[in-house]
Amino acid sequence: MKNKIFKYDFLIVGAGLVGSLAAIALHKKKYQVLVIEKNKLFPKDERTLAVNANSRDFLKDLGIWKDLKSNFEPIDKIVIKDYVNEDDLIFHNSTESMGSVIFNKSLLKISREYLIKNKILLTNIDFNSFNIQPKKIFPINSKKFLFNKIIFSLGKNYENHKNFKKNTFDSGHKAYVGFFNHQKNHKQVAYEIFTPNGPLAVLPSPSKQKKSSTFIFSTKNKMSFSNLSKIIKSNFYLSHGNINLRSTINYYPIKPHLSRPIQKDILLIGDTAHSIHPVAGQGWNLGIKDIQTLCYCLNQYDIDDANFDEYYFSKRIIENFTYLTFTNILNHLYENQKPITNSIIKASHFFLSQFPYLKNLFIKQAMGKN
């Protein structure tokens, strides 16, 4: 037993939302998978998550969605406003909700309970991820392990990993994230408002009274609590009534990136593989697409096939690059505030509002069902 080598198909480094859900999906496909996480106790995550229709259906297929019960708020309508056009763009689907808003901690709790129950999660692992190599014996807690493939799901805040090539595009924006309570029912409507200082997204937050919402404001300007409160109140007083901004505001720099591994049998998912400007609201949902694509590739190729890694990467790079480019262009158009860019914005608004086919394409894109 002393010299026993524990063999696994996959090692997933990082037990965040995407890493945990990838482990569940692979485990349900009968692969031997192990997840390691450096933290012993997982931090309380008070943020919310915008789950599009495709990601919701994925969670249903895993058997997780039903366990969220009342911990999610459907998004029945998306309203887009800007400072160029007088009329709003309104998107909704007549047959199902556009998506849902959930608390990160709710989904994280359910996911990790599954991993713990099935004994595929090791926490408080003090390791140097630079040293982990596929198909080579690696010691963990005095035991020897051998992994066919390694999946990194470390988030976006890793620096110069020797097995990754990372291309970063610094937007110069910071994202301010928080909650506010309001007088009126939010009516399960999500908003994207393009202000002269940056995009402001507001989502209905799960609450019994439907009088709580979450926001993310991305801007190049330094914002005080007072300024944030004024911006939100001025834009949402008519729709939400009296507004009280909660005092806890988180902020972080926005640096969209694309990464790829430079070594065979190493795969990247979620924020390790890509991050995009939150104006698109699809960052986490792209991580779910990574998992779905990985499972699709496993249906098409044997895990040891020489083409497996490149096939997976080629299936993801186009969509990830498209989203990154689209969000960068969108921000550039609104930030310029010049006649030519305003004309482009007006033309885009006109075509989306006047041509149902284009509008339906946008709705499918927002729902992740493109």
Image (tube, grey):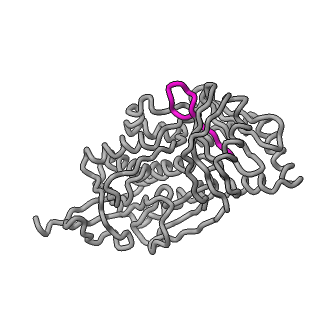
Asked whether 346 or 243 is in front, the reply is 243
Q: Quadrant of residue 306?
A: bottom left
* x and y, in percent, of residue 41 in the image: 33, 52
Residue 327 in view (yes/no): no
Compared with residue 364, is residue 255 higher up or lower down, i.e. above or below? below
Q: Residue at x 57, y 28 (%)?
A: 211
Compared with residue 255, is residue 66 higher up or lower down, i.e. above or below? above
Q: Residue at x 43, y 58 (%)?
A: 153
* x and y, in percent, of residue 241 in the image: 68, 28
The number of numbered badges drawn on the structure is 0
214 sits left or right of 130 in the view = right
Q: Quadrant of residue 243?
A: top right
Magenta-tinted stretch: 200-212
* Most distant residue in the right direction: 339
5 sits left or right of 135 in the view = left
Q: Quadrant of the C terminus?
A: top right
* x and y, in percent, of residue 37 in the image: 34, 58
Q: Residue at x 39, y 72 (%)?
A: 130
Taking the magenta stretch, the answer to whether it contains residue 169 is no
Q: Quadrant of the N terminus?
A: bottom left
Residue 163 in view (yes/no): yes
* Most distant residue in the left direction: 1
Q: Residue at x 61, y 53 (%)?
A: 175
* x and y, in percent, of residue 317 in the image: 56, 59
